[in-house]
Amino acid sequence: MKPVNLKRLAEELNLSVATVSRALNDRYDISQATKDRVRELASKLNYEPNPYASGLRRQKSKTIGVVVPEVANHFFSLAINGIEAVARANNYHVLIYLTHEDYERELAVTRLLANGRVEGVLVSVVNNGEDFSHLASLQERGVPLVFFDRVHEKMTTASVTTNDYESSYQATRHLLDNGCRCIAHLTVSERLSIGKRRMQGYIDALKANGIAYDEELVVHTQSNKEQDTQTIQALLLKRPDIDGFFASVESLAMCSYEACRNLGLTIPDDVKVIGFSNLDIASLLEPPLTTITQPAYAIGQEAAKILFKSIIKNMAATSAQNLELKSELIIRGSTGPTVKQVSAKMH
Amino acid sequence: MKPVNLKRLAEELNLSVATVSRALNDRYDISQATKDRVRELASKLNYEPNPYASGLRRQKSKTIGVVVPEVANHFFSLAINGIEAVARANNYHVLIYLTHEDYERELAVTRLLANGRVEGVLVSVVNNGEDFSHLASLQERGVPLVFFDRVHEKMTTASVTTNDYESSYQATRHLLDNGCRCIAHLTVSERLSIGKRRMQGYIDALKANGIAYDEELVVHTQSNKEQDTQTIQALLLKRPDIDGFFASVESLAMCSYEACRNLGLTIPDDVKVIGFSNLDIASLLEPPLTTITQPAYAIGQEAAKILFKSIIKNMAATSAQNLELKSELIIRGSTGPTVKQVSAKMH
DNA sequence: TTGTATGCGTTATCAC
DNA sequence: GTGATAACGCATACAA
């Protein structure tokens, strides 16, 4: 089967390749009659320009890259949703790369994106590895970069995050207000800025309420659900005075549910639980989980919008474009004696 | 900043562009000394071949496309995970497109993939629209196509699905065995083969147990969660004899939970619920949800493997490559008087 | 073992 | 208005 390209169209229409190209691009210097003839045949043959040829010529890929730790995760899948919507509105394509929290993988992916494959990149970085030179060199190569949610603080580029410090402070205070005195903090990373901010909010809220920070109550997990559940169970056995869990990621809140169930502890009577989460059915859990919910879709959307601004202006994204969105504290049964359906906007 | 391309390398090394190209591609006719020199500089300058140039020249994009209705969905995000793993193993890139169940969008996306952007496509089709000529023409253009989960039965190409008929039969029988006599079927689509198979399993299981099929008990939903919940509530009010729900998608099982809660009905005492679902925390719901769980990751993985076989052999995927994986019935509290943690493999 | 020349499909520049 | 031609960056057939 003969390929459908400009040459083919030109031959069948007795026109030059150049004219056909210009007609399809609706250039002003082509007569309407010719444009019509060209378009008719093009649509008849289902002509579609070869993106590799026009990309090479124009030095544009019309593609952005998205680098995330995971996709099987409510937060990231919603963010990708938002990103895809913006990309589509701009007629851009979306390449997706999963790092699975593997720094080496992030490095490899970054290399692949260095030479024209994409016009810009959205990244949520892995939680191990503080070196970001690979990302900086991407930027030096002229590929604009926007962080979302998980950022390298010291790198000068745009980012979209949430008010993690405030949220953590508020979450911790919420547990304290509801009577908790010994609150464990479940977290995946203390290195990442996001981890630090969430940790600091936790610590400051404790201090403000006259409670000493106890390092033993901080659990750094990094593995699979089964192991994390075991770790949490071990902590509960070691420290039976624990009466609250603050989970900085959704999966750890779920692990604490499992751990409590395994040990015969009742939530919220024995232990209260609050967690960062984008779980849409948090209210159907037993008990319904009190959450701090990030505006995941909006985060993806805004990050993509900032990226496209950089792409259009043909310059690197700057730290001046940093955007902080607000998370929402949604109070449910896991932190109170009664099941409240109150939804309090954070300010 | 000067671009890092073959020309640049060639100039700095006093070699021809061709030699540099061959050295980097490790061709046998280049001396080891030259290869070493070239590689050293390439790695020093972080040279990465321009994919648009080599793609154009080799007529290979090293990219596959994934077209799915959604990503914020446990099944699809797990499948994408599996796809990405296989693509990565083959050094391919993954373009992702979300159709949001919009047939027009599927059409538009298909057009974009027609001319060299991808070497193959994995599709889970939208549930409205029975015409698949757009996909067939993709295939005619030489782009191999593999369906996963949601297929067009009449189209001759490879597909990876699950034993939907059996699973539905088994799910319905499970409800019957546990005492249900009036089972509503919640479904999103009767047009798609997957919808038909699931419906048929439901009908046949009823028949085999001497229960008449009642069309009124079949709910076709298509909108958002709030509306679906309303629809289910309305049905429950109209037919108070309903004592079981069989949801053919996860979200509808959740809607039935909401509906029951809103009406003050208790699961599983008043109504039992079973649903297709890849929710990892089904066991933490109140009550824990009995599920038919598809091997989502494996589905993505196998579909991608089949696609790569076609790409390597440079020919269309055939129906002979159809693969059917088995779903698993996981019995939990929502279908029984007691909370069983039995997990029974289907055979 | 290396260099020269050509072409992948498209778009931009220059003629006419 | 339209046609020839060059160039984007790379890989390969053919020369040397």
Image: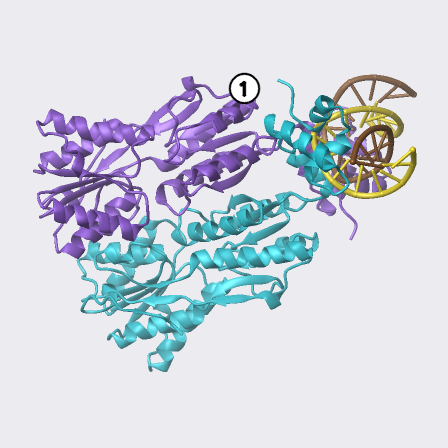
Chain colours: A cyan, B purple, C yellow, D brown
At 30% from the left and 45% from the top, the residue drawn is B279
At 9% from the left and 27% from the top, the residue drawn is B209
The subunit letter for the residue under badge 1 reads: B
Is residue B53 something one can see in this rendering? no
B21 left or right of A117 in image? right
Residue A93 or residue A37, whichever sits in front: A37
Residue A40 image-quadrant placement: top right
At 76% from the left and 27% from the top, the residue drawn is A15
At 45% from the left and 41% from the top, the residue drawn is B99
Q: Position of residue B308 (x, y in %)?
A: 51, 27
Label 1: which residue? B315
B235 left or right of B106 in image? left
Q: Position of residue C4 (x, y in %)?
A: 89, 27
Is residue B245 something one can see in this rendering? yes
Q: Residues within 10 Å of mark 1 (few under 14, many from 20)?
A: some
B296 left or right of A285 in image? right
The residue tagged with tag 1: helix, strand or loop?
loop
Say how many tags the image has. 1
B228 left or right of A85 in image? left
Q: Position of residue B297 (x, y in %)?
A: 39, 37
Residue A36 or residue A257, whichever sits in front: A36
Quadrant (top left, top right, bottom left, bottom right) of the C terminus of chain B? top left
Residue type, label 1: Met
Q: Position of residue A77 (x, y in %)?
A: 43, 49
Toward the front, the furthest residue is: A33
Q: Is residue A12 above or below residue B217?
A: above
